[in-house]
Amino acid sequence: MLGRTWAATILCHGAPQETRPEVMASKPKLYYFCGRGRMESIRWLLAAAGVEFEEEFLETREQYEKLQEDGRLLFGQVPLVEIDGMTLTQTRAILSYLAAKYNLYGKDLKERVRIDMYVDGTLDLMLTIALAAFSAPEDREKAQASIVQKAKTRYFPAFEKILKDHGEDYLIGNKFSWADIQLLEAILMVEELDAPVLSDFPLLKAFKTRISNIPTIKKFLQPGSPRKPPPDRHYVETVRRVLQF
């Protein structure tokens, strides 16, 4: 198990730096595949908060079954995150906890419900991108074109209007929040499918530049960070093999 994790770490990020065990124990630990999927937004949120974390990459069915046998996968699903003495599953619950813990979840219930609305919208868009990687090769181009069209007609116009209506730098309360992180991640994912997708959205283009230059996010966007590349054939095959679907 340790050998496989070490090898996967080198494959994804290069050789990790030596870290003392007592320091490592205090870091959140993430269990998922060596790819984006449902874990990537968790990586983004931790990175934006300036929190270092460890990862164990699932490469075999045996690793996944061991997590199940140990009772660590509540509904038999990953992502799995160990943090603050807890074992957490379910992406949305993990993200909500991290956003609250690191003061990225608004100042009151009214701000939080707006953050939830904006985040849910971007997560819907991002899920369609993630699922497209598992479509048949002959269907993938059509699926990606549909995603870009939805982004340009449904999601990006809504966020452009939000920024225009309140005239502030951030989506909620003129303070950096989880919603900003999630939107930037979604923008960058759609740009990988269609680079000029923001050409008709000047406020979103400025938003992208502004949020990308926040120091913790700028660091996460640099080569060698824990950020994962778009899913490739190896990632898709690994997920299918481990989850047996």
Image: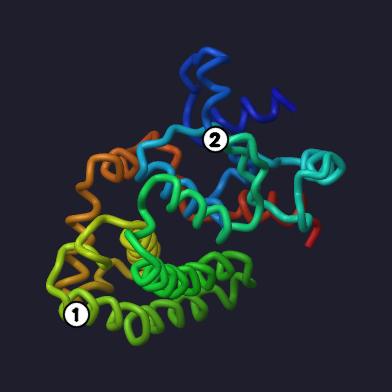
Q: Residue at x 26, y 55 (%)?
A: 176
- Residue 6, can we see it? yes
**How many numbered circles are shown?**
2
Quadrant placement of the C terminus = bottom right
- Residue at the extreme left of the image, as rendered: 167
The reply, left or right, for residue 148 in relation to residue 67 is left
Residue at left 28%, top 83%? 157
Q: Earlier in the sequence, mark 1 or mark 2?
A: 2
Of residues 209 and 229, the one drawn nearer to the viewer in this rendering: 209
Residue ID for mark 2? 28
Crowd rating for badge 1 (residues with CA inside 10 Å; few <14, some 14–19, many 20+):
few
**Frontmost residue, 96 versus 244:** 96
User: Which percent across, then down, holds residue 213?
Assistant: 20, 48
Mark 2 neighbour density, 10 Å: few (under 14) some (14–19) many (20 or more) = some
Q: Name which quarter of the figure residue 150 lies in.
A: bottom left
Q: Secondary structure at mark 1?
A: loop
Residue type, mark 1 in image:
Asp
Q: Which mark is residue 200?
A: 1
Q: Quadrant of residue 171?
A: bottom left
Q: Is residue 192 visible?
A: no
| Image quadrant in which you'd find residue 22 | top right
For the residues carrying marks 1 and 2, which lies nearer the camera in this image?
2
